[in-house]
Amino acid sequence: MSPTAYSVLVIGEVSGNELAYAISSAGEISPHDVDVYDDNGDQASRNWEAPAYCGYSRILGDAQLALFVEFSNTIKNHPSDEVFSRIVARSIGGQVVYPSASADPEEAWLVEPDGTRAQVRVVETEEQDGRVRYGILR
């Protein structure tokens, strides 16, 4: 099995430990096997041998975090984007937004902690300082 990547937005504040637990639940691995790191932080303490990693960036707008997660081919469970997002939302007790299969890059799904989902649009606007703000429209 080849590596699998997930790109999601998280609405709400979540700790690194909470992310590790949520991602490990999705991959059916130990939280110690997930390297969670700030994309803009110090990379020296990373666990480069971890079978799963989660880079996060703090973002502006309706979501607080952008996550990029990758499961290596050594992990047996590689859920779909929908299942991954449902597991993470339930685990963190917050909302997760993942891309739809549509050709429109703004179309996405928002998953609630109880597993319900709704179609949304993710609209990116650039601030005067060059940073991107993410709006989630229902």
Image: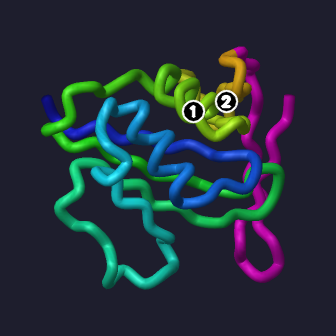
Report whether 10 appears left or right of 57: right
Disc with the residue nearer the chain's start (1 vs 2): 1
Q: How is the image coloured?
A: rainbow
Residue 13 is a magenta residue: no
Does the residue at mark 1 contact the one at mark 2 (Cβ under 8 Å)?
yes
Q: Is residue 41 above or below residue 93?
A: below
Considering depth in this image, is 54 or 108 the residue closer to the camera? Answer: 54
From mark 1 to mark 2, how far is it between C-alphas?
A: 6 Å
Amino acid type, mark 1: Pro
Residue 107 placement (x, y as % from top left): 67, 29
Q: Quadrant of residue 118?
A: top right
**Disc assigned to residue 60:** none
Q: What residue sits right under mark 1 in the picture?
A: 99
Q: Quadrant of residue 88?
A: top right
Q: Quadrant of residue 25?
A: top left
The answer to whether 66 appears left or right of 45 in the picture is right
Residue type at mark 2? Glu
Numbered badge on residue 107 = 2
- Taking the magenta stretch, the answer to whether it contains residue 127 is yes
**Left or right of 92, for residue 71:** left
Q: Residues within 10 Å of mark 1 (few under 14, many from 20)?
A: many
Report the span colored magenta: 116-138
Q: Position of residue 104 (x, y in %)?
A: 61, 30
Q: Main secondary structure of the magenta part?
A: strand
**Residue at image location 59% in from the left, 54% down from the top:** 66
User: Which quadrant of the figure contains the N terminus?
Assistant: top left
Percent of width and height locating residue 76: 20, 27
Q: Residues within 10 Å of mark 2 (few under 14, many from 20)?
A: some
Q: Residue furthest right?
A: 138
Quadrant containing the C terminus is: top right
